Amino acid sequence: MDYQLLDAGDGRKLERVGPYTLIRPCTEALWKPRLKPERWADADAEFRREGKKSGWVARTKLPEQWPLRFGELTMLIRPTDFGHLGLFPEQLASWDWITERLRKIRRECSVLSLFAYTGAGTLACAKAGARLCHVDASKGIVEWARENARESGLENAPIRWIVDDVKKFLRREVKRGHRYDGIILDPPTFGRGSKGEVWKIERDLVPLLELCREVLSERPLFVAMHGYTLGMSTQTYRNLMEDALEGLPGSIHHGELTSIPEHGLRPLPHCAVVRYDGLKE
């Protein structure tokens, strides 16, 4: 993989992203960095949050985008105006876990990817032979995901690309009787749907998970949820999934996704992860 977390501390993280070394804000990294200041000073660019003047400060001129090898995929990296790159590298552990399950069973599976962003989860499942439904409220983000599919040689994979509000889409899927063997969801703290619908996690996550239960097949393979909302613990996410999936055979486990910097420096926590595993009782 062409990505490596190099160090973290003082509210920032130092990353190697393909041929470039970048610094981005990181609220979790409250400790002191371990690498020497000169290593940080050599970064090609840094994203700084300074009120209305937030943006990238580049020592090296960055291209608008560049390809990054990510597991079995190739993703297009784009330094956005809000500091994102179009990829959450820590989630590779989840894609490995999911694709392992998809490859264990000898039947075609249908997977629903919600808040699907630029498509890493979608494409990992497609690479493992699943049929996908990719849903995100942003037309531009869905097009970015489709470009990633082409970069990864999956332009002809069985993927439905949907630009829609997730809740509205799920309600229609329930009425249509569509069912899925696996669901991936990365619910944001706050967001807006394709027609301005407002999403608030504290209000909308419970009914969303209830809708997810309704579109699951009779014997689902997995549900994987990642949570980045400050103030919501991993146990909270797990409790909500337990409520929504109560009575299904299988097991639920939870934890935290972290990145380990080079040379065994301090791990950086990223997000909560809760997984329902239909293969295990």
Image: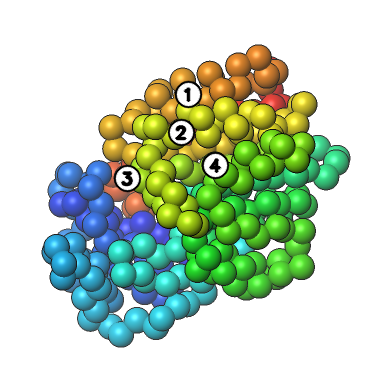
Residue 251, located in which quarter of the rendered image? top right
Compared to residue 81, the image places residue 170 above or below, namely: above
Q: Earlier in the sequence, mark 3 or mark 4?
A: 4
Q: Which residue is mark 4?
A: 167
- Number of residues whose C-alpha sits closer than 10 Å to that of mark 2, classed few (under 14), some (14–19) or many (20 or more): some
Circles 3 and 1, Cβ within 8 Å, touching? The answer is no
Q: Nearer the viewer, mark 2 or mark 1?
A: 2
In this rendering, position of residue 255 left or right of residue 264: right
Q: Earlier in the sequence, mark 1 or mark 4?
A: 4
Q: Earlier in the sequence, mark 4 or mark 2?
A: 4
Mark drawn on residue 240: 1
Instruction: Tell me the residue at 53%/18% (across/down).
Output: 243
Tell me where residue 258 appears, x and y as whole percent.
Answer: 39, 42
Q: Earlier in the sequence, mark 2 or mark 1?
A: 2
Picture mark count: 4
Tell me where residue 42 appears, x and y as whole percent.
Answer: 22, 74
Q: Disc 4 marks which amino acid?
A: Lys
Q: Nearer the viewer, mark 4 or mark 2?
A: 4
Q: Which residue is mark 2?
A: 205
User: Furthest-right residue in view?
Assistant: 106
How far apart in space, not on screen, are marks 3 and 4 (Cα)? 32 Å
